[in-house]
Image: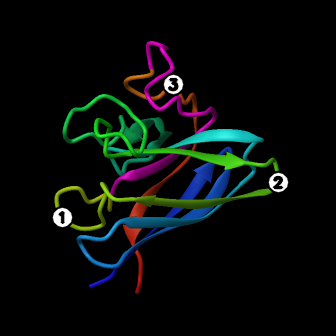
């Protein structure tokens, strides 16, 4: 049975991202747009908590139930919340188009009720050699976030 979710991003930039999953064995497809991003790559992560009471800070660390190091979306060792980067051309709107086979909208790896965060800087995918590479991808400030909620099908 298909499941859909949505996230409305607010902060220094804004946008809406939709999540679609055909069934519990299918990848989750993210689509939508972010408005106001500066030109370049920006880290995109799912954080542990669906709590935005103190802005994006209260969303906690990346969603990482296996307690792995940070990595790229196609790495065997990565946080479940590591979705890599979205890239802005500098145009007013940046399209989001991501497919991920590790996250889910149902079951133990469900991201529903967690927070999607857009970062100011590129995610170095855990390979940057910076002290934050293995925990955050050294992706910089959290410039927008929103709680992922179930959407009407």
Which residue is found at the position 72% from the left and 46% from the top? 37
Side (left or right) of 121 relative to 2: right
The secondary structure type at the circle numbered 2 is: loop
Q: Which residues are magenta?
A: 113-132
Which residue is found at the position 36% from the left and 40% from the top? 75
Mark 1 or mark 3, earlier in chain = 1
Along the viewing direction, whichever of 109 and 26 lies nearer the viewer: 26
The secondary structure type at the circle numbered 1 is: loop
Residue 91 - label: 2
**Mark 2 crowdedness (10 Å alpha carbons): few <14, some 14-19, many ≥20:** few
Along the viewing direction, whichever of 5 and 94 lies nearer the viewer: 94
Along the viewing direction, whichever of 122 and 113 lies nearer the viewer: 122
> Magenta-highlighted stretch: main secondary structure?
loop
The secondary structure type at the circle numbered 3 is: loop
Side (left or right) of 16 relative to 71: right
**Mark 3 crowdedness (10 Å alpha carbons): few <14, some 14-19, many ≥20:** many
Side (left or right) of 60 relative to 52: left
Location of mark 1 (residue): 107
Give above or below for 1 relative to 29.
below
Mark 3 or mark 2, earlier in chain = 2
Residue 128 belongs to magenta span? yes
Q: Quadrant of the N terminus?
A: bottom left
Q: Quadrant of the C terminus?
A: bottom left
Give above or below for 84 relative to 70.
below
Residue 148 at x, y percent in the picture: 41, 61
Tell me the distance, in whole angstroms, between the alpha carbons under discs 3 and 2: 24 Å
Q: For the view shown, which residue lies furthest in the right direction?
A: 91
Residue 67 at x, y percent in the picture: 21, 33
Residue 37 belongs to magenta span? no
Along the viewing direction, whichever of 127 and 63 lies nearer the viewer: 127
Location of mark 3 (residue): 138
Which residue is found at the position 32% from the left and 39% from the top? 79
């Amino acid at each position: 049975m298909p499941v859909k979710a949505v996230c409305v991003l607010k902060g220094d930039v804004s946008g809406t991202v939709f999540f679609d999953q055909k069934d519990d064995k299918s990848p989750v497809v993210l689509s939508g747009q972010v408005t106001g991003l500066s030109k370049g790559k920006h880290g995109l992560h799912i954080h542990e908590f669906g709590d935005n009471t103190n802005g994006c800070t209260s969303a906690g660390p990346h969603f990482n139930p296996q307690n792995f190091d940070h990595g790229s979306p196609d790495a065997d060792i990565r946080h479940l919340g590591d979705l890599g980067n979205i890239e802005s051309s500098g145009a007013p709107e940046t399209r989001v188009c991501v497919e991920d086979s590790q996250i889910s909208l149902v079951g133990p790896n469900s991201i529903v009720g967690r927070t999607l965060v857009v970062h100011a800087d590129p995610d170095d995918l855990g390979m940057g050699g910076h002290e934050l590479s293995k925990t955050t991808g050294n992706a910089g400030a959290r410039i927008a976030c929103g709680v992922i909620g179930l959407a009407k099908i």
